[in-house]
Image (cartoon, rainbow, N blue to C red):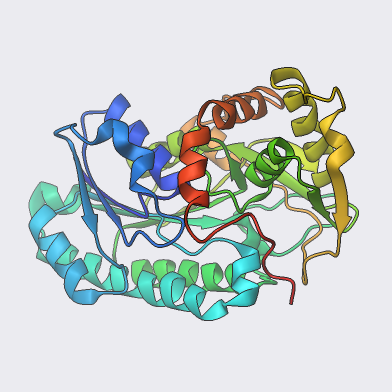
Amino acid sequence: MNILVTGGAGFIGSNLVRLLITTTEHTVLNVDALTYAGNRHSLDDLATNPRYRFAKADICDATAMAKIFADFSPDWVMHLAAESHVDRSIDGPGAFIQTNVVGTFTLLQAARGHFDKLTGPAKDRFRFLHVSTDEVYGSLGETGFFTEHTPYDPHSPYSASKAASDHLARSWADTFKLPVLVTNCSNNYGPYQFPEKLIPVVILKALRGDPIPVYGRGENIRDWLYVVDHAEALHTVIAHGKLGETYNIGGNNERKNIDLVRLLCSLLDELRPRADGKQYDSQITYVTDRPGHDLRYAIDATKIKRELGWTPKQDHSSGFHKTVQWYLDNEAWCKGIFDGSYKLERLGKT
């Protein structure tokens, strides 16, 4: 298979590309605009692999997308390219509308043009997987779970832009008969995550001796999904999923933010104790909550388990241990990011 992965230099994308190259015989073209969160160094280990290719291109560029489809002739498209940080969407929502909505439209049009020209087995095997988030569903109370039939209720510019892109993908399936699948996942964590998200922020601020910020009182609850588990789920869905269907992907791993922060601190106490003998949780600082901060997300992943046989491999502690150890072992990767414009500052206050 020729697989086109958009956003393959990002966090989830780079882990997906590595999985595809190292565990299958597929050829992968990674298309990424290399914005602030795209990092080609995340895939340095694949640079000489003959089945891996890279193209720097913006999914909003219709001419570039048409050429990529014509030259590479993908069998599968796995669309992950997106602006994804809620705090950044509060500060600058325009970029989220452009990439997540206009970019998805442009990519769908390029895929449609390519698909309409296919015949025979090539047409039969074509798939377009649109990768999205559970944040489109809004916020849960203390009980209940998001299912594939939960009504959309986005509360941030980020989640609203992803909701719009989900609707576009499904409408191209219904109107133009494009063979589309959609996934909605819970919060990802693991190697190569740009250090603006909660888990790398906690780890890196702890190691620097900085205050560890916790929004509000840390009562917000998220379901945490190890990124390699997610990558395996995405491959399972595009290979075996039913066209036109949506699959929710979760980690079965709900935690309050404050409990997660304390767990990460305890892992750091174990793996790299502070020189002064104090515990890392002494650095926890409560800060003003994010505007529109959803209380709880929780995924019901019954459908993907029942229909496709996928379940997460990492349990409630193993993935977090792997993640902390990865950041300890890859400080040079993080330093390369801090040499740029991002300095672990807080975004999205207003």
Whole-percent x, y for residue 152 in the image: 64, 68
Residue at the top extreme of this rendering = 270
Whole-percent x, y for residue 28 in the image: 23, 42
Q: Is residue 53 above or below residue 348?
A: above
Along the line of sight, which residue is nearer the eye, 274 or 112? 274
> In this rendering, would 334 be left or right of 104?
right
Q: Is residue 293 above or below residue 23?
A: below
Whole-percent x, y for residue 342 in the image: 55, 58
- At x 79%, y 39%, the residue is 261
> Can residue 223 be spotted in the picture?
yes
Quadrant holding the C terminus: bottom right
- At x 22%, y 49%, the residue is 54
Whole-percent x, y for residue 99 in the image: 42, 71
- At x 76%, y 40%, the residue is 209
- At x 85%, y 22%, the residue is 277
Quadrant holding the N terminus: top left
> In this rendering, would 278 be left or right of 226?
right
